[in-house]
Image (cartoon, rainbow, N blue to C red):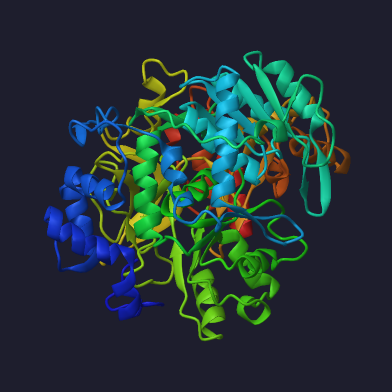
Amino acid sequence: MSTANPQPLWQPDPERIAKARITRFQAWAAEHHGAPAEGGYPALHRWSVDRLDTFWKAVTEWFDVRFSTPYARVLDDRSMPGARWFPGATLNYAEHALRAAADRPGEPALLCVDETHEPRPVTWSELRRQVGSLAAELRALGVRPGDRVSGYLPNIPQAVVALLATAAVGAVWTSCAPDFGARSVLDRFQQVEPVVLFTVDGYRYGGKEHDRREIVAELRRELPTLRAVVHIPLLGTDAPEGALEWTALTSQDTEPVYEQVPFDHPLWVLYSSGTTGLPKAIVQSQGGILVEHLKQLGLHCDLGPGDRFFWYTSTGWMMWNFLVSGLLTGTTIVLYDGSPGYPDTGAQWRIAERTGATLYGTSAAYVMACRKAGVHPTREYDLSRVECVATTGSPLPPDGFRWLHDEFAESGADLWIASVSGGTDVCSCFAGAVPTLPVYTGELQAPGLGTDLRSWDPSGRPLVDEVGELVVTQPMPSMPIHFWNDPDGSRYHHSYFDTYPGVWRHGDWITVTSRGSVIIHGRSDSTLNRQGVRMGSADIYEVVERLPEIRESLVIGVEQPDGGYWMPLFVHLAPGAVLDETLLDRVKRAIREQLSPRHVPDEIIEVPGIPHTLTGKRIEVPVKRLLQGTPLEKAVNPGSIDNLALLGFYEELARKRG
């Protein structure tokens, strides 16, 4: 929490503040739109939420957003859900992502790295040419605006080309990483009924090749809406019968044609973790993502031409979409396809070195793993170009801040540490990086511009220096336009607006400090969040409970004070079953093969029973609170539980674990 006179861990020097793009934006917005010229970031943020329409108009002008038809007004309806941004405007996301090709055709747009760690560039002109060729071929296949195009792809250049070509056509992109099992992919893609599937034959991870051809064959069988499958031979195999070859679709020298679509036209579908049933298919708009990402990347992350942007991610996580949007600012983006720790724990630092990354993003878990393993980044690698290390996925603990700061300070580097927090739901950050503000240990620097973020108590009263619910009280452009297959909007409304009508409740515990910084304490719901990837407990239950020995199960993710993350799986066995090594191995193997290695729990623990609400729902959040040390009487309403005595087991387990 806030203390009287805390010393910042890092303070930007006057030169950095002066050259920051957000400083120049504030001066320009003061001259042209009445923003405060004095008062620094706090004053700018206050203006951005008090004058929401004016702020977002200023963003579109500052970044020269090209509207092919003009908008009638900035914000037609402020209600949440239902806010309508820039009605009447048309534009195209891909056109903006490829604008730098005109000025810097021979410079790298992409730097592609695999586990050999040798970067391969794709120039702006080559990226633009491939997008133009593929967009024309998609149109020839009958793909039209609004059609869904899917990718079962790792973080490779072909995925970026496919996304941009899809957007150029006005179709809707959606992707899963190839470490997802068939069931996980189908639970997502079957909802949106794609007409094209881009897929690899396999992928490389941890020094091994993983053949995915059988899974691809299953996807083709179970996705009846597919008109075409495009084969990318990452492992060098021949295309299966009836599939199209990637090279044939991207070999023409074709000028891109950009479909001009309404501002709120769907750009892509992202997926929630599926905690309660099927993953939510979250639809975000071309215009909403364009302006939000220009603001977030161009102002908060301070990215522009000459920068190199590396974030360790996969195509199954919103940070991949966020990374691709680095192109909007003319930045070179770094695509890494491989294990975060291969061939050793320092792998990501080696990639940052070899690509000349200026902003390097990773997970808090990776930072803590490096600290534990005795990695010394600036001693072992030339990181002289790295200006900012950003972390997300889970809160970076204070020891992580101090370790990063001290490791870089040892080499004389002035490192800006940006811990950020947002969500798939908005594909952006609610709070995090501000290049002109100090960094306090364990804290995010501030809420983002245009983001009216608050901490509320259960009655909707704002809190300062106390833990509350993360809420956003005014609309953001990248909030979902809708969920797929949610015709009356009820699922969308239930996901964010049931607790506080008309106000977005995100599901994080936060503290807004009296100095304006933000502390994230973890999820206030039961979403699993491991290594920065959100996962659903429902997926795990489905797999585990297929085994006849398992009567019922409960999986919990617990953020720990040292920055670790403990994910136990509790199992209630069928009569006569024994949790021996054979059954343990079967459970782990089933989860690994049918979901992914990330879904495998840290421990599997036999329990006398699984507690439920009176309506039969497993009570994940109260058990999580018990495991975090919350007393039983504060963790749960006793009158809502079917067998209160069962909670004693989890309370005792928490006590033993300390």
- The residue sitting at the right extreme is 582
- The residue sitting at the top extreme is 224
Position of the N terminus, as image quadrant, is: bottom left
What is the x, y in percent for residue 55? 21, 49
Task: Work out whether 79 lies above or below 378.
Answer: above
Viewer-closest of 7 and 56: 56
Q: Quadrant of residue 189?
A: top right
> Is 266 positioned to the left or the right of 59 in the image?
right
Query: Do we see residue 278 in this rendering?
Result: no
What is the x, y in percent for residue 596? 71, 40
Residue located 45% across and 45% down the image: 97
Residue located 54% across and 79% down the image: 408
Task: Work out whether 601 lies above or below 379.
Answer: above
Residue located 58% across and 75% down the image: 383
Residue located 77% across and 28% down the image: 215
Position of the C terminus, as image quadrant, is: bottom right
> Is 548 positioned to the left or the right of 487 in the image?
right
Viewer-closest of 236 and 655: 236
What is the x, y in percent for residue 607? 69, 39
Viewer-closest of 363 and 84: 84
What is the x, y in percent for residue 174? 55, 31
Task: Work out whether 33 lies above or below 643.
Answer: below
Viewer-closest of 623 and 187: 187
Query: Do we see residue 409 in this rendering?
Result: yes
Total marks in image: 0
